[in-house]
Image: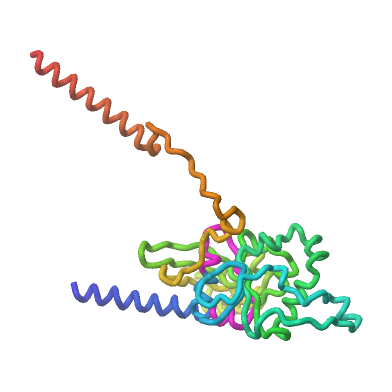
Amino acid sequence: MIYIVIIIIVIWLLIRLKLDSNLKYIVRSFESNNTGVFGRKRKGKDLLTQAVIYKRKKYYYANIDYGYNLLKEIDISELTLGKNDYHNFINGNIEKIERTFFESVDIYVSDAGNYLPSQYFKDLNIKYKGLSLFLSLQGHTYNSNTHFNWNGEFGRLYDKAREQLDDIYRALGRIKIPFIGIFAKYRYFEKPQTAELNLKPYKTNKLIDSRQNKALRDQYYATNGTIKDMWIFVPYRIIKYDTRAFEKKVFKTDSKRLYVPKQRGRGILFIKPLRLMIRRLTNKVKSIIKSIKKK
């Protein structure tokens, strides 16, 4: 029995080392580049942001509170260089402005698809011309990066923001372990074109030899950039963000949640037929007992 326990512990430690290695890879990506995380609802987009913020242990700006070292909750309209746009740079009449953010402090934008939806690109191009300039020059102006996550497909985010992304992750799913934490799976894309197509990592063809496989794999990644699937583990104890943060942004403070009133005599779908079956069985037993007594 002791040997089985030791084997289980060793296997778990090896798995944990791999999971930690994957998270370190992602953290380095966030430290160096503008990143984007997209995917369907409840797949772990904010979860990845939370894990990165916890591991980095640095001050940050965001539009929701992820806990730890938040400096300030910001509005997306602040991501600008004053009234400057490309006209000012072309004509050499750049307007000098006061600094808005601290040096080397990254910005995290949650649910960016609701702020910068691609279908309204015409309005965004007119009203927020400075956004793409801010993102493009952020390394020069503030020595920092901006990280977006959004719900839906890759094309959901405003194209001027997508163009500035260096590394892209698709949230593929998560597995909750009660009282312990969450396992989450992500797919990394080096190129936006492959993220849009959601290409999978190269799969070895067992029908051909290893030399041909290597050549095909090299060609695949040379064309499509690096693509890799990664699992990470996030303990519940480090999760500080509110999974329903936008509830407070949208509704009044004193507005209570509305629930459907409980209906009497209507249980869970399978309970009602079960009750009926038990009642019939009880009635049948009673009738049998009565007939026996009569005899």
Q: In which quadrant of the rendered view does residue 77 lie?
A: bottom right
Q: In which quadrant of the rendered view does residue 253 lie?
A: bottom right
What residue sits 73% from the left and 72% below the top?
163
What is the magenta range?
26-47
What residue sits 22% from the left and 23% below the top?
284
Residue 226 placement (x, y as % from top left): 60, 76
Q: How is the image coloured?
A: rainbow
27 in magenta: yes
| Nearer to us in this view, 174 or 111 | 111
- Say which quadrant the C terminus sits in: top left
Determine whether 98 is above or below 290 in the image: below
Residue 19 placement (x, y as % from top left): 44, 75
Judge from the rendering whether residue 81 lies leftward or rightward of residue 37; answer left or right: right
Q: Residue furthest front?
A: 254
Residue 258 placement (x, y as % from top left): 51, 45
What residue sits 69% from the left and 68% below the top?
76
What residue sits 66% from the left and 61% below the top?
113
Q: Residue furthest right?
A: 91
